[in-house]
Image (tube, rainbow, N blue to C red):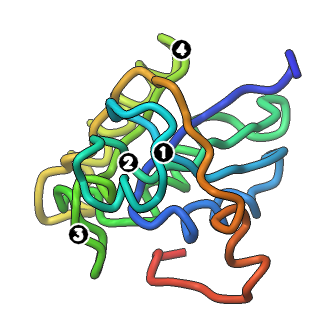
């Protein structure tokens, strides 16, 4: 897997975020889970309380020869409202926050520059509140959450 890279994004309900990234050419795989919190091996029910500090997130394995991290960032910004703190649509709580969890200094620099460009672009009427943090342990969500839309044929309000 040395030729592949990892990107981790949180942008609200992870089902829609995963579906949006899974369809990007060059993305090898996606999985939903929890990151950015303090509890080890959290369950969905625990994360939903907001007490673990975790965000619902999507881990994206991609081939940088086919898709760049910058392209994934563009997709990320198009999926959600990055100006709402701890909320996406009807989903409220810190687990639904907007965040980019970076896996390298290069990703951190690109994510920060991208956020600054988006903030200056005028696309959003409020300031962007997206967190950019070093990636921490990623806890895969329960199997029934993985590829949820593909399994069940549903969609949600993620803007893609």
Residue 126 in the figure: left or right of residue 117 = left
Task: Give the image quarter of residue 80.
Answer: bottom left
Residue 65 in the figure: left or right of residue 112 = right
- The earlier-in-sequence mark between 4 and 3 is 3
Q: Quadrant of the C terminus?
A: bottom right
Tell me the residue at 84%/44% (across/down).
28
- The earlier-in-sequence mark between 3 and 1 is 1
Identify residue for label 2. Answer: 55
Residue 97 rendering spot, x and y as whole percentages: 29, 53
Q: Quadrant of the N terminus?
A: top right
Q: CA distance from mark 2 to mark 4?
A: 19 Å
Identify residue for label 4. Answer: 104
Within 10 Å of disc 4 (Cα), the crowding (few <14, some 14-19, many 20+) is few
Identify residue for label 3. Answer: 92
Q: CA distance from mark 1 to mark 4?
A: 19 Å
- The earlier-in-sequence mark between 1 and 4 is 1
Identify residue for label 1. Answer: 34
Within 10 Å of disc 1 (Cα), the crowding (few <14, some 14-19, many 20+) is many
Within 10 Å of disc 3 (Cα), the crowding (few <14, some 14-19, many 20+) is some
Q: CA distance from mark 3 to mark 2?
A: 12 Å
Label 2 with label 1: CB-CB less than 8 Å: yes
Tell me the residue at 20%/50% (across/down).
128
Quick one: SS at disc 4?
loop
- The earlier-in-sequence mark between 2 and 4 is 2
- The earlier-in-sequence mark between 3 and 2 is 2
């Amino acid at each position: 897997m040395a030729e592949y890279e990892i990107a981790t994004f949180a942008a609200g309900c992870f089902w829609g975020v995963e579906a949006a990234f899974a369809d990007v050419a060059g993305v090898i795989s996606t999985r939903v889970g929890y990151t950015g919190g303090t509890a080890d091996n959290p369950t969905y029910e625990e994360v939903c309380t907001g007490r673990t500090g975790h965000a619902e997130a999507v881990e994206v394995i991609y081939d940088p020869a086919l898709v760049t991290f910058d392209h994934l960032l563009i997709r990320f910004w198009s999926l959600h409202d990055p100006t709402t703190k701890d909320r996406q649509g009807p989903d409220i709580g810190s687990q639904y926050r907007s965040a980019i969890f970076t896996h390298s200094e290069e990703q951190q620099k690109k994510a920060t520059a991208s956020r600054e460009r988006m903030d200056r672009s005028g696309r959003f009427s409020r300031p962007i509140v997206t967190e950019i943090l070093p990636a921490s342990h990623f806890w895969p969500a329960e199997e029934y959450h993985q590829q949820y839309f593909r399994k069940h044929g549903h969609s949600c309000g993620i803007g893609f």
